[in-house]
Amino acid sequence: MEKLNLKKKFMDFRELPADEKKQMAKTFFIDNALLILLLLAIIGIQIYQPKFLSLSSVVNILSLSAANLPIALGIAGCIILTGTDLSAGRIVGLTACVAASLLQAASYPGKMFPGLATFPIWVVLVIVIVIGAFIGFVNGFCTAKFNLHPFIVTLATQLITYGALLIYLMQGTNNGQSISGLDSKYTTFITGSVVKIGDVPIPNQVFYAVIITIIMWFIWNKTAFGKNMFAVGSNPEAANVSGVNVTFTIIMVFVLAGIMYGVTGFMEAARIGSNTASTGANYELDAIAACVIGGVSFVGGIGKIRGVIMGVVLLRIIFVGLTFLGIDNNMQYVIKGLIILVACALDMRKYLVKR
């Protein structure tokens, strides 16, 4: 059936006047300009460095994408509401350090809380989810109840969260040092592997990311909350008239985002192995860039889970490719900024054309 539809569309396109064909082709290339450029860049890097897309490199890209996918899925909901979340990276950092401190090996000499036994993994997961959800609730409550722009609210909570992280790192015997010496059960739970492709192991966090993505897809597409989120993002006044609880929806979108940040921090702590105050710094930039590349629009009410996945993977491929090319890490920040700028400009252009 899908093949028949594609064939029909192709036939309809062939029957259009030349001017309409030209306009449609132009619109397609402009709407997908960034995606096309990124794909061309990937092809170019592969030609220059044939090992770029080797099996081990692809698995590494999948692992890095899995680590960044939950935070991107969280921020995507905020963008759909025509907002953003600048506190995301710092929430990841705080929850990562909390998880690491509670899951240090009992025998580790530099244990942050020497008198505290190593917590069960599931208990720590619940703790970091609650921390993320609470900060998300604060973001959503201030945005919805006080009618403040999410940019301002999350900028404030970003600073508050970072301050809380610095204070936390001074507790126990840590004195601001990095938190390492994690329990092997915890690191194996995240970075261990039970599946291999050839001789290359696939980290467990890839499968956790798949499960999280399925859950988020269900929430977005199969629940009343998901429909309300898109309705509020498209037109909050119309959604309110239609009976949608706009305040509750906004709060819950930010709570859900906070939960995703907590999960990201939980996985990131084990992946990094040594967590400091800089853990999570600027993670929100990658997440925002991935969302916009994947078609999540700042004009509100537009976005798909598959687009977020595509954006995360493509962006990660580009950054791994830049490393293969020997591009300086500092220069990569410049490139990230340019990608965000171009993506937002193209997104706004599509919005203006539709108007």
Image: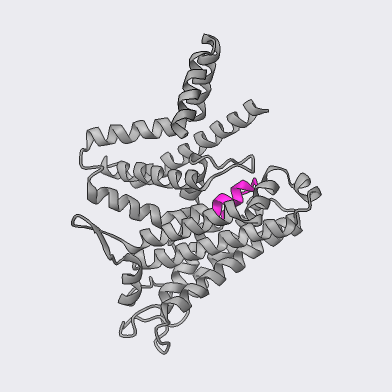
Residue 78 belongs to magenta span = yes
- Could you tell me residue 307's position as x and y percent? 49, 43
Q: Residue furthest left?
A: 199
Task: Write down the quadrant of residue 68 in the picture.
Answer: bottom left
- Could you tell me residue 3's position as x and y percent? 44, 31
Residue at (47%, 56%) from the top-left corner? 213
Q: State whether residue 182 appears in this view.
A: no
Does 265 appear above or below 14?
Answer: below
State the extent of the magenta-drawn residues as a range. 74-86
Does 145 appear above or below 335?
Answer: below
Residue 292 belongs to magenta span = no
Left or right: residue 331 versus residue 44 is right
- Could you tell me residue 286's position as x and y percent? 46, 48
Residue at (32%, 76%) from the top-left corner? 185
Does 190 appear above or below 283?
Answer: below
Residue at (22%, 38%) from the top-left corner? 49
Left or right: residue 242 versus residue 178 is right
Q: State whether residue 51 appears in this view.
A: yes
Residue at (42%, 81%) from the top-left corner? 120
